[in-house]
Image (cartoon, rainbow, N blue to C red):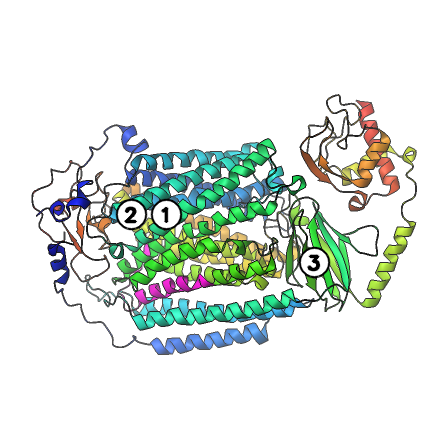
């Protein structure tokens, strides 16, 4: 650096005008005390008077742990916020420019204060360490949750939750039953795109990722019905993708399970496609199918292809399964649903959207026969 | 003695002045002048801000009723996806770096322009087409999976998703080039005597931002390229049904998008660090700590991306380092906030709208920072992830942080950019309306999320209607309050009072020349003796041509043999 610049730096400069006040300024300590009292009161609200479980019950075992951490962070987060905003408002009022101040008046010329800066690095660091230690402890509790007394699966579909129980051959949709006080291991995955499994009252969440199985372990504590919510965007009806979690008493769960087993025994029976009524099928199509399928040609897609020319479309000689379009093969699609490539024009086509199976669509044998009759009639009338 | 003689090596390159272009196109359309490019960024960014803001209002109208119904679900999904993409990539990032970075940063370091003016021109001219491509995706079916576009649903998404990929890819290239340009400019083109610790803090913030832009954006480009290839040619990078991995996208995306939140907040830290000293008439408290904490935040910002993925599926133990590193960021951020508070202490505070927005920034950003710590803790995040708590948090840091910062910067640098003053009283109204309606809009979203409302929904459960209506009404007032700013700007341009060169008596270099500054910025490049925040002392610059403040309609006379050291 040139001598000229160095010399200029050493020039002694005009004395700064004296500050208005001595010490930390008027009212600093009273304001600090008022803010501290506010913080204590808010902490009491968070911990005792209006704790989170008052609004959102703790229905399963890790919820109280997670709430404890949430309250701990709320207390300290609130304290930091109150001090920052409190001092900001207080300094703004006390140190504002007044009408009587000369136009060239300036503030107190201080650049730093090493001790103060050291403290406001150390104290937040300690706080962060405390929060980290508490978080890691709760995290360990989550990892050490016991499960396995009831092991089951939840599978996300557009836009439904499917539940599989080891004792049931078929899946259950929309309603998940678990017995109270029974450690549950829940494996979650997806049949199509990413969904997420969340029960606010359990405070747990896991994304349902296709091709990946994640595990949640929890122990239901309170009998009741709770919401299962999809929290990862999954398509046009994401906002309506819910299921219900029933935490049943041991007895109720037993009743429910045996009723399901019985229903399975009675279910099934032969499909009599010749009993289908096209008119009933048309009505059913409007309720169950038309949100994804038009009755136009194949290309007129909503989610799935248009079904108006199922039997008579030279450009799509096959069903998406690759099978010939006849009544029996159409009924297979309705029974099993479909996921995979669009084989209607030959092999190796790109994937087409997911169609739920008969359980997901709640289709009885008669419903299927009616739908097949309707779909067949569409192609014949044109 | 001329400045060049004091610092021969440093000044020689910049001492000659290019002639100002004379054609309209050369002056205003394809200008190489960083100031003109900055203004072009601001105008374009403002346009996209208005479009993206109107999209947000569509979202809030839809959510007035639990069953929605204002627009179809598909349209709604496109609307919120483009609201977020438009605000993040077409508004905040271009305004902060491209806009204010280009206009203010070279002036602040006493440079004539950025290091690579042609690259700068290219960076800008990628931006408007990228925005047009993004919003034109509405014509073919807008992307519907949010700004994060997680596959596999984005692979199956409407055709506009491919346009989204192209638009964001382009704006990413633009950001990378701007990052490189600013990095070289700040490293090599500071005025003589402007050591690192004499740089204005806004320049420090731009330096940290440039680093992030240069290093992080390429990850996004790669991820977008793969998504585009998968959508167009069927190469399965992400679709698990055909052997891809959906989590690959999430890692690549967040490796960019977490640093991106610092790309969107560090410049706002810079705005506040300039505005506080000016309107408190005090040196910034803890200059070095503020400067270094920007760099610390930028570096730590690279190591925390997976905290967006605690519920996505990863090895459980891997959650711990990401959680702890995220919490550590609170320390440098806290240092900044405490330093700003200490700058207020003992000040001579003037409540200009720029100062009000900077103060408002501290309040809402602190709140958003604290909810960020909640989200960093894995157990709490397991409850809050994917709920309305997340939009609440991001709007506190991106609207309350970045946009409040941009508003503050608009009020602060407007006279320098346009040469005219704004109506301060109207600005005060704008602030209070914005501040109140902002909190009415976004505060209820916190408990909506905690109590069970998921995000990105076109319908919701009836029990959440009251607070959604409150948020919607808040957002309508928020939109209306922005009209006050637009009116104020238009009014100032048409009949605003002419601004003196330095209306706030600020001390950084850009205020020491006329408003607006001439094409060549400084007739002679000044030498810098100190950092600019010592009020009550003479200005720490020597070699400023006193006529710089007066007249810029004539090209400068050749540098005189001698300039008296001193301050104009």
Q: Position of residue A141 (x, y in %)?
A: 63, 68
Rendered residue at 45%/51% (across/down): B259
Does A30 appear above or below A262? Answer: below
Q: Chain of mark 3?
A: A
Which quadrant of the figure has residue B31? top left
Q: Secondary structure at mark 1?
A: helix
Q: CA distance from mark 1 to mark 3?
A: 45 Å
| Residue B186 numbered mark, or none | 2
Where does the image place residue A73, in percent across and percent down from the top left?
52, 68
The residue drawn where x is 18% and y is 69% is A17
Specify whether disc 2 shares its chain with disc 3: no
Tell whether label 1 touches label 2 (CB within 8 Å).
Answer: yes
Q: Is residue B166 left or right of residue B317?
A: left
Residue stretch in magenta: B328-355
According to the picture, the residue beneath numbered tag 3 turns out to be A227
> If you read the primary sequence from the N terminus, does the residue marked by circle 2 or circle 1 appear first?
2
Q: What residue sits 83% from the left and 36% below the top?
A: A332
Indicate left or right for B301 with B415 as reference. right
Does the image show residue A64?
yes
């Amino acid at each position: 650096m040139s001598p000229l610049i160095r010399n200029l730096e050493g020039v002694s400069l005009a004395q700064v005008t004296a500050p208005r006040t001595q010490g930390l300024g008027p009212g600093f300590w009273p304001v600090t005390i008022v803010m501290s009292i506010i913080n204590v009161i808010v902490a009491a609200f968070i911990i005792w008077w209006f704790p989170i479980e008052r609004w959102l019950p703790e229905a399963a075992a890790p919820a109280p742990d997670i709430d404890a951490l949430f309250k701990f962070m709320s207390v300290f987060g609130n304290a930091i916020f109150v001090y920052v905003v409190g001092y900001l408002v207080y300094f703004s009022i006390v140190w504002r420019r007044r009408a009587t101040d000369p136009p060239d008046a300036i503030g107190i010329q201080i650049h730093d204060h090493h001790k103060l800066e050291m403290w406001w690095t150390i104290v937040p660091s300690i706080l962060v360490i405390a929060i980290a230690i508490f978080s890691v402890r709760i995290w360990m509790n989550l990892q050490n949750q016991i499960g396995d007394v009831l092991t089951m699966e939840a599978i996300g579909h557009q836009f439904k939750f499917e539940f599989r129980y080891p004792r049931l051959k078929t899946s259950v949709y929309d309603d998940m039953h678990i017995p109270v006080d029974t450690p549950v291991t829940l494996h979650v995955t997806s049949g199509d795109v990413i969904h997420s499994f969340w029960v606010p009252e359990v405070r747990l969440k896991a994304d349902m990722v296709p091709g990946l199985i994640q595990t949640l372990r929890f122990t239901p504590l309170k009998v009741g019905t709770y919401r299962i919510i999809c929290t990862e965007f999954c398509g046009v009806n994401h906002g309506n993708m819910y299921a219900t979690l029933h935490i049943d008493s041991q007895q109720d769960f037993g009743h429910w399970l045996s009723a399901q087993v019985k229903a399975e025994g009675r279910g099934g029976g032969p499909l009599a496609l010749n009993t289908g009524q096209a008119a009933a099928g048309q009505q059913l199509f409007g309720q169950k199918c038309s949100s994804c399928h038009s009755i136009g040609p194949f290309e007129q897609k909503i989610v799935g292809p248009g079904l108006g020319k199922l039997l008579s479309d030279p450009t799509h000689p096959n069903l998406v399964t690759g099978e010939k379009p006849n009544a029996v093969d159409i009924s297979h699609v309705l029974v099993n649903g479909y996921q995979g490539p669009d084989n209607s024009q030959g092999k190796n086509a790109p994937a087409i959207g997911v169609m739920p199976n008969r359980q997901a669509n709640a289709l009885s044998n008669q419903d299927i026969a009616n739908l097949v009759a309707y779909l067949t009639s569409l192609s014949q009338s044109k | 003695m001329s400045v060049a003689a004091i610092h021969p090596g440093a000044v020689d390159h910049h001492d000659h002045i290019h002639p100002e272009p004379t054609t309209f196109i050369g002056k205003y359309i394809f200008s190489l002048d960083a100031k003109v490019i900055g203004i072009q960024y601001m105008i374009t960014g403002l346009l996209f801000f208005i479009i993206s803001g109107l999209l947000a209002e569509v979202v809030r109208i839809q959510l007035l009723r639990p069953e929605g119904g204002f627009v179809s679900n598909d349209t709604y999904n496109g609307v919120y996806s483009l609201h977020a993409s438009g605000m993040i990539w077409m508004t905040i990032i271009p305004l902060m770096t491209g806009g204010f970075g280009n206009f203010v940063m070279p002036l602040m370091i006493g440079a004539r322009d950025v290091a690579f003016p042609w690259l700068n021109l290219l960076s800008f001219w990628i931006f408007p087409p990228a925005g047009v491509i993004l919003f034109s995706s509405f014509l073919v079916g807008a992307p519907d999976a949010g700004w994060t576009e997680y596959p596999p649903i984005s692979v199956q998404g409407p055709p506009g998703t491919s346009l989204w990929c192209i638009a964001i890819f382009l704006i990413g290239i633009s950001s990378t080039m701007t990052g490189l340009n600013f990095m070289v400019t700040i490293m090599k083109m500071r005025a003589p005597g402007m050591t690192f610790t004499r740089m204005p803090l806004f320049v420090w913030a731009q330096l940290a931002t440039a680093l992030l832009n240069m290093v992080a954006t390429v990850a996004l480009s790669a991820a977008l390229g793969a998504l585009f290839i998968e959508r167009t040619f069927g190469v399965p990078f992400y679709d698990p049904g055909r052997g891809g991995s959906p989590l690959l996208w999430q890692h690549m995306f967040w490796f960019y998008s977490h640093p991106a939140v610092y790309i969107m907040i560090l410049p706002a830290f810079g705005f506040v660090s300039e505005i506080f000293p000016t309107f408190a008439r005090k040196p910034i408290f803890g200059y070095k700590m503020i400067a270094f904490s920007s760099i610390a935040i930028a570096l730590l910002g690279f190591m925390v991306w997976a905290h967006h993925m605690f519920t996505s599926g990863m090895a459980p133990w891997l959650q711990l380092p990401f959680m702890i590193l995220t919490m550590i960021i609170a320390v440098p951020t806290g240092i900044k906030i405490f330093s700003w508070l200490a700058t207020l202490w003992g000040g001579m505070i003037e409540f200009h709208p720029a100062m009000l927005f900077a103060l408002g920034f501290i309040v809402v950003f602190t709140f958003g920072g604290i909810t960020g710590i909640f989200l960093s803790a894995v157990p709490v995040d397991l409850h809050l992830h994917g709920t309305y708590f997340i939009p609440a948090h991001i709007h506190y840091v991106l609207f309350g942080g970045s946009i409040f910062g941009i508003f503050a910067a608009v009020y602060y640098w407007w006279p320098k950019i346009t040469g005219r003053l704004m109506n301060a009283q109207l600005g005060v109204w704008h602030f209070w309306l914005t501040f109140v309606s902002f909190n009415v809009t976004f505060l209820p979203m916190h408990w909506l999320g905690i109590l069970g409302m998921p995000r990105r929904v076109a319908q919701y459960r009836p029990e959440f209607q009251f607070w959604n209506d409150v948020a919607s009404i808040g957002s309508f007032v928020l939109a209306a309050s922005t009209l006050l700013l637009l009116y104020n700007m238009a009014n100032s341009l048409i009949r605003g009072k002419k601004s003196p060169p330095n209306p706030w008596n600020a001390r950084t270099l850009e205020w020491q020349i006329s408003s607006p500054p001439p094409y060549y910025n400084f007739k002679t490049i000044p030498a810098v003796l100190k950092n600019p925040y010592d009020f009550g002392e003479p200005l720490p610059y020597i070699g400023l041509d006193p006529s710089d403040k007066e007249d810029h309609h004539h090209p400068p006379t050749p540098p005189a043999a001698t300039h008296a050291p001193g301050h104009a």
